[in-house]
Image (spheres, helix red, strand yellow):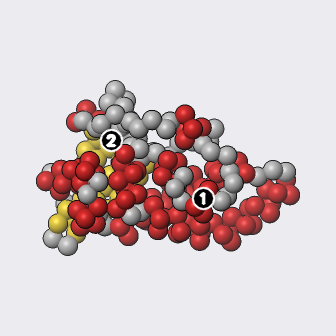
Amino acid sequence: AWSIYRIYGALEKDDTITLERKIDFPSVRDSLKPAIRARVDKMLDRATGDAAGRLRDGRLRQQVGPQLLETALDKIVTPQSIASLYAWRGDISQVLKEVKEIREIGAAPDEAGVAGSVKPSPLRLSNIKRFAFTSPTSFEIGIAKDASSSEPDITIHMGFRDMDWKLTGIVPKVEGPH
């Protein structure tokens, strides 16, 4: 519990030095890949036009997509960006706006990104919707943006690494197609 409190305090104070010590960044990058891939694919889908354009974009996505994903993850999974992801309560679209390579896709902004540009209220214990041990050396906590919600919007994973409890994963809720 102390490690979670330290991470929470570092996020609240934008203390990137503590975040660097308490976060296993390679593991967090891996945990965010599916959510980032889904968001980038959604943006690419919005940017496509006719059938020929979709076919071309499909091939381009296969060639450029993995590199774009890695570039985005390298820029998103930093102490500063993790703090931003926390500030936006897991709203990846808000964090992706800061990645130049994503902006260059030319896709229309996400509706949540336009209307949802007001930062959410602070988190309280009532925002925690799930806690579960996943092994003797790891656990997860599900957190909802809205305390009255019954389902978490983001799940964080903690693991015992290098003789300390560290943040090892962040899994935002992936929304279905609109």
Instruction: Give the SS element for disc 2.
Output: strand
Residue at 25%, 50% (x, y): give it.
13
Q: Which tag is nearer the camera, tag 1 or tag 2?
A: 1
Q: Amino acid at mark 1?
A: Ile
The residue under label 1 is: 102
Residue at 69%, 64% (x, y): give it.
61
Instruction: Give the SS element for disc 1.
Output: helix
Q: Is residue 89 visible?
A: yes
Number of numbered labels in the structure image: 2
Q: Is residue 76 left or right of residue 42?
A: left
Where residue 173 appears, as percent x and y from the top left, is 45, 45
- Where does the C terminus fall, quadrant-wise? top right
Q: Is residue 76 left or right of residue 56?
A: left
Q: Which residue is more in the foreground, 15 or 70?
A: 15
The residue under label 2 is: 143
Where residue 57 appears, as percent x and y from the top left, is 75, 61
Residue at 85%, 51% (x, y): give it.
50
Where residue 64 appears, as percent x and y from the top left, is 66, 69
Residue positioned most to the left:
2
Residue at 39%, 51% (x, y): give it.
84
Q: Amino acid at mark 2?
A: Ile
Q: Is residue 139 visible?
A: no
Q: Which residue is more in the foreground, 48 or 139?
A: 48
Crowd band around label 2 with a 10 angstrom C-alpha radius: few (<14), some (14–19), many (20+): many
Where residue 7 appears, as percent x and y from the top left, is 23, 54
Q: Is residue 76 left or right of residue 121?
A: right
The disc placed on residue 175 is none
Instruction: Give whichever of discs 1 and 2 has the lower sequence position.
Output: 1
